[in-house]
Amino acid sequence: MSDLLQRLRDRGWRLTAQRRVIAEVLDGEHVHYTAEEVHARAVERLPEISRASVYNTLGELVALGEVVEVTTDGRAKRYDPNVHQEHQHLVCSGCGMIRDVRTEGDLMAALPFGERFGFAVDEVTVTYYGRCPGCAAAS
């Protein structure tokens, strides 16, 4: 059983066949699928699942805080179920693949107080860009 599926069960979220399949598709480390990719994988498991069911369920999962939307460089939104572990993202500038990375140190401390311009900073998000091994080899 996936971690996401268990978290949803623990919350008492009604797990229809469609919701269960979507949660199963989102299971795993480094999962950052677009809604279309979630739909394509869900159809393999449940052929009658509609795009509307996928989009609606993803919206509900985001609203519940069980999945976050990740957008990089104007590409399609991707959905990340890894919401309970602090992490940043490493993005391939070639193919768009995203990997979760755990950084060391205090990211807030990296922003000097004088560079905060009076902001009360609530959150720090760092995105690293580079080329994955496949794209680097193709260059």
Image (cartoon, rainbow, N blue to C red):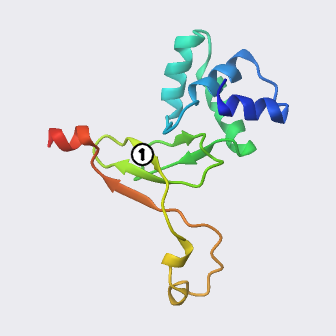
Give coordinates of residue 59: x percent, y percent: 67, 38
Q: Residue at x 51, y 36 (%)?
A: 31
In depth, the one of 84 and 66 nearer the eye is 84
**Which quarter of the rendered picture does the N terminus lie within?**
top right
> In which quadrant of the rendered image does the C terminus lie?
top left
The answer to which quarter of the image holds residue 98 is: top left
Check disc 1 and give the amino acid type.
Arg
133 shown above or below 42 = below
How crowded pointer 1 is (Cα within 10 Å; few <14, some 14-19, many 20+) is rated as few
**Residue most extreme to the right:** 12
Please provide percent x and percent y for residue 9.
79, 29
- The image shows residue 116 at horizontal and vertical percentages of 55, 83
Tell me where residue 56 appears, x and y as whole percent: 68, 31
Against 83, residue 18 (above or below) is above
Q: Point out the residue furthest to the bottom here.
A: 114
88 relative to 67, above or below: below
Residue depicted at 57% across the width and 46% down the height: 69
